[in-house]
Amino acid sequence: MPDYFALQGSVPEFNTPLPVGQLYFPSRERYKRALRKIFDRQYYTNQGPIVRELENRLEKLLGVKNVICVNNATIGLTITAEALELFGKVILPAFTFIASAQSLMWAGLQPVFCDIDRVTLQMDMKHLHSLIDQNVSAIMGVNLWGGACSPHVLEKMAKDYKVHLYFDSAHAFGCAVNGKMIGNFGEAEVFSFHATKILCATEGGCVCSNDDDLAMRIRNIRSSYGSGALIKVIKTANGRMSEAQAAIALMSLDDFPENQKHNAELYMTYKELLSSIAGLDLVEPSGVSFSNYQYVVCIIDEGQFGISRDLLLRVLRAENILVRRYFYPGLHRTTPFADNIPDKLKRLTNTDKVCESCMQLPVGALVSVEDVGRICKIISAAHNNAPDLFVQFGEEH
Ligand code: T4K
């Protein structure tokens, strides 16, 4: 067999690494212009005019009464749990970023992990239903991969069981469900504006809520003078977004329509080029009428594809295509959560299967349609040469 792949010693397909994640960079000129205003005003942080402009624009765009900007989504989730005055257990999927569950730990709450649906990769409603008892005070819905976890169903369930409902919507900025913008469901929703997200503030995020009292508590826990009435809260934190973060977020917001369109085009290109490959399924952003296509996720069936997800990962990474296997091995198998989970809840069949077989492909402003063509060519070659790759590398770990 010729040394076709970089893993076999050939030259990598890409000279520079192609990461997973949005990584949007405005031009230096725009960046300088935005930052100059901060220096002219000599005002870096604490609910300055740029943060206020960002909050106002987001409220209008999302059609939500309150947007509270924060310095990352993890603190946004923690502050929201505090402001909701939760107690005991909170149900969330095991298939999510560790920050979703860590926010509960910081708020003194116990995470309870729910399984996911094999096709949509969103929370499994039937399993969620079975986990509710009198010690559960809330459900944290997680809207993953530019899709949504049936927020209308969750709203009904929360009402029936009289539990709180809020959402980790770190992956869902700009998405809509039957025309209603994400940001308006449950009591609150939290977006991430991390560098790898479609709305980028370098680090950052926001909490959205249509409940004015809850929003007031969140603002006071976040701390920032001049951002509404002062009310009594037990704990406060520093969750403030700086003017520099907000300035970048505003540029990213201006370019959101273009970046969303670009992501959608990349997704369609992947779909067209990968659809005929046996054992590789591209995951559709589910449950939304509009997606940001922030992530491109695929599932590898080793039996049909010919090599495992992990070997394909090695093949691609050697080509400088930095694919990821978010959120392996699932939070129910991750320290510190795994130690405290009773045996009967340790096995989450669908989460376990998906964690062993899913992979995220490059997408975002730094990736071109031509790049996607080259990535798909390597994936297709790996499938065609699977028997040889398996013999050469299949037994290695
Ligand atoms: N809930 C969910 C469901 C989430 O996915 C996340 C975060 C959160 C809550 C919490 O949101 P934040 O508190 O972070 O706002 C990344 C991100 O750090 C994290 O925000 C994200 N989810 C998670 C899914 O992915 P890493 O460890 O993969 O990121 P990192 O730094 O390795 O970057 C990814 C790739 O991009 C690497 O190849 C390096 C490259 N990169 C990254 C940055 C930041 C660059 O080339 N330039 C850059 O500036 O976690």
Image (tube, grey):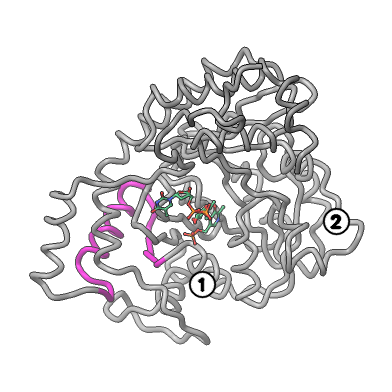
Magenta-colored stretch includes residue 64: yes
Q: Which mark is first along the chain, 1 or 2?
A: 1
Q: Residue at x 30, y 54 (%)?
A: 249
- Does mark 2 have its CB less than 8 Å from ligand 1? no
Is residue 66 in sight in this rendering?
Answer: no
Residue 348 at x, y percent in the picture? 82, 48
Circles 2, 1 touching at the beta carbon (< 8 Å): no
**Pointer 1: what residue?**
79
- Residue 346, numbered label: 2
Q: Quadrant of residue 227?
A: bottom left
Q: Amino acid at mark 2?
A: Lys
SS assignment at label 1:
helix
Name the one closer to the observer, 12 or 305.
12
Residue with the most extreme left position: 40
Magenta-colored stretch includes residue 225: no
The segment highlighted magenta reads 45-71
Split into 4 quadrants, where in the image is the C terminus?
A: top right
Q: Residue at x 46, y 33 (%)?
A: 290
Using the image, determine if residue 88 lies above or below residue 291. Answer: below
Split into 4 quadrants, where in the image is the N terminus?
A: top right
Q: Residue at x 54, y 60 (%)?
A: 187
Using the image, determine if residue 129 lies above or below residue 205. Answer: above
Q: Residue at x 70, y 29 (%)?
A: 300
- The Cα atoms of the two marked residues, 2 and 1, are separated by 28 Å
Q: Does 161 sit left or right of 297 as displayed?
A: right
Circle 2 crowding by C-alpha within 10 Å: few under 14, some 14–19, many from 20:
some
Residue 345 at x, y percent in the picture? 86, 56
Residue with the most extreme top position: 276
Name the one closer to the observer, 256 or 150.
256
